[in-house]
């Protein structure tokens, strides 16, 4: 299980419209998708930088995971996501290496990806996502 590339970097923001404007005006990047993920209580916006995406995350509910994150830590990098070939095999391998998983089986994320999170207490403080394009 070697990640193929960094699929995306998730960034928690208070106001997604302002953050989109920043990436578009300062970097000339183009937001190509805005998607709400109801189960995660987030609105997402995507930019491409080569193979890697920037995923902006704004909470739709103060009690959602991004709402709580911003309350605790403020805006900033929320997670890093690695693209893998077989997400369930990868999760098994990672767990066998003693890493605590948040998701033992994949769930649906934005951008038609199957995703799963590893617990930051096992990953040197980095909330780590692995994902597979279906
Ligand atoms: Zn993500």
Image (cartoon, grey):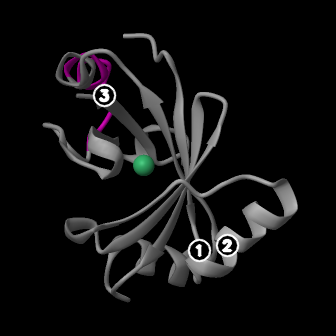
Q: Which residues are magenta?
A: 92-101
* Mark pair 3, 2: CA separation: 26 Å
The image quarter in which residue 83 lies:
top left
Q: Are marks 1 and 2 in contact (CB under 8 Å)?
A: yes
Q: Which sits earlier in the primary sequence, circle 3 or circle 1?
A: 1
Residue 13: mark: 1
Disc 2 residue: CB within 8 Å of ligand 1:
no
What residue is disc 2 on? Answer: 19
Which residue shows up at 34% across the image and 33% down it?
A: 131
Q: Nearer the viewer, residue 16 or 29?
A: 29
Q: Is residue 96 magenta?
A: yes
Task: Judge the density around disc 2: few (<14), some (14-19), many (≥20) Cα neighbours within 10 Å.
Answer: some
Which residue shows up at 53% across the image and 53% down it?
A: 32
Which residue shows up at 48% across the image and 75% down it?
A: 58
Residue 65: image location, x then y, percent: 36, 71
Q: Secondary structure at mark 2?
A: helix
What residue is disc 3 on? Answer: 132
**Position of residue 122 in the picture relative to residue 98 (left or right):** right
């Amino acid at each position: 299980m070697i990640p193929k590339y960094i699929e995306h970097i998730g960034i928690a923001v208070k106001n997604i419209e302002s953050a989109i404007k920043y990436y578009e005006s300062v970097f000339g990047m183009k937001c190509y998708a805005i998607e709400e993920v109801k189960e995660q209580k987030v609105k997402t916006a995507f930019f491409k930088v080569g193979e890697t995406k920037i995923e902006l995350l704004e909470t739709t509910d103060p009690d959602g995971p991004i709402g709580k994150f911003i309350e605790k830590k403020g805006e900033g990098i929320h997670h890093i996501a690695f693209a893998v070939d077989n997400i369930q095999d990868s999760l098994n391998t990672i767990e066998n290496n003693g890493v605590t998983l948040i998701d033992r089986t994949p769930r649906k994320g934005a951008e038609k990806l199957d995703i799963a999170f590893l617990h930051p207490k096992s990953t040197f403080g980095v909330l780590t996502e692995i994902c597979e394009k279906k």
